[in-house]
Every structure is written in C-alpha cells, then in structure tokens.
Amino acid sequence: NAGVTQTPKFRVLKTGQSMTLLCAQDMNHEYMYWYRQDPGMGLRLIHYSVGEGTTAKGEVPDGYNVSRLKKQNFLLGLESAAPSQTSVYFCASSWDYYEQYFGPGTRLTVT
Amino acid sequence: DQQVKQNSPSLSVQEGRISILNCDYTNSMFDYFLWYKKYPAEGPTFLISISSIKDKNEDGRFTVFLNKSAKHLSLHIVPSQPGDSAVYFCAPPAGSARQLTFGSGTQLTVLP
C-alpha cells in the first residue's frame, strides 16, 4: 500500500515549456486535490476532483489544467510554464469529507 | 482575504515543556478543523482534528482547543519532543468537496 505517490519528484523547466505531473493513489479514494506551496505560505488549492471524470477549479487555477480519466490517477498539466509557477506541488486524496492524505510533493523550478 | 491565520511564523520551546500553537479564523461556517504536521521535503500528515460541536479533543500528547466565540483554536503539545520539530498547519475543510483552507503555518523547533 503505497498511499499517494507523485511523479516526478523534481523538475526544471524553461519558460514556455509544458509538462504533466502525475498523482496516483491506491486507497480507492473518490476525492483528489492538487495544491501548491510557496515559501512562507500555506498550501493553496489549484484544482480538485470529486470522482472519476470530474474536475473543478480551486483557489489558484490559472495556468493549469487537470484530468481524472481513472479513479486512481489525477494529472496536473502546465501548458506554458512561467516563473510564477515555480513552487512545490502536492497531491492529496480522501475518501470522506475530512482527512486528506498527501503525497511527498514535486519541486518545480521554471527558469 | 485570509480566512485562516497563524500569526506566529515560528516558535521555539525546550524539550519537555509545553508548545502552544495558535490559529484564528474568520469564516463562521467552518464546522471542522484539522491540524497537519509537515517535515521538510515531505507532504503534510494529519495530526488531530476537532468538530465545532466540541471545545476540546485530546490524542496522547496532543490536545486541540476550540473557542468558537473568539474564532480561535490552539494546539497544545506536552511534553514537547525534538521529533515534534516541524511546520504545523491549521486547515479547516470547506466547500463542496471539503477542500482544505490552510493557514500559513508555524515552524515549531523543540530544543534538546
């Protein structure tokens, strides 16, 4: 039981490049979330999903897209990376309305 | 508009003493509160929670107190241990998917 895993752990992009972050969970959770954390700040919600095939915008969705084609996977895409997207990205999942389980994070640097 | 505020960015305490971490909120619709603990280079992990119908919840060395009239929570850790050194986030769930609203966190350092 791996819990929540994120791929990759680190990535450096140049401005304008694209990439996809993969989140996978093996707990059969319905809810999945993508957050970003910037220095000195708490985590902020980018997008979330309440079930397979559904997605919704969070607090800071601009510049990101997501897809939830399979229940266990939640993908976060950056179509044209910008330096402002340099951050640590966390994926989380939950089966109820309360406790969320987080992955280890992806550290992204955009130069 | 920050709905959840943790006004102390850092706190240092001696091993064995009590650590008190504070959280203030503005949204009276929050009905549940979670505390998460985060070590460097790891994701947050759930620590303890409290429902708005209670004013105290205890789990081992950790106790959370809720003062609804003041819109204030506090997390007490006693006795504090060096392994408790981490960033602590207050995070009430809200919204249609109960997404978490995080405070900015408090870095706790427990000195041996």
Image: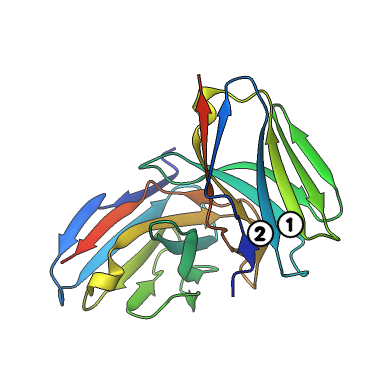
In the image, what residue occupies the spot 47% across and 49% down? Answer: A102
x, y percentage for residue A83?
Answer: 23, 71
Residue B107 in the figure: left or right of residue B96? left
Q: Nearer the viewer, residue B73 or A47?
A: B73
Expressed as whole percent of the image width and height from the top left, the position of residue A5 reads 37, 48
Q: Which one is nearer the viewer's eye here, A35 or A76?
A: A35
Q: Which amino acid is tagged 1?
A: Tyr
Q: Is residue B59 above or below residue A80?
A: above
Q: Residue at coordinates 71% horizontally, 27% vertically from top-left?
A: B60
Residue B52 appears in which quarter of the rendering? bottom right
Q: Amino acid at mark 2?
A: Pro
Which quarter of the rendering shows the C terminus of chain A?
bottom left
- Identify the secondary structure beneath mark 2: loop
Number of marks: 2
Identified at 48% across, 60% down, the residue is A43
> What's the mark number on residue A23?
none
Q: Identify the mark at residue B32; answer none if there is no mark.
A: 1
**Discs 2, 1 touching: Cβ within 8 Å:** yes
Residue B92: which numbered mark, if any?
Answer: 2
| Quarter assignment of residue B37 | top right
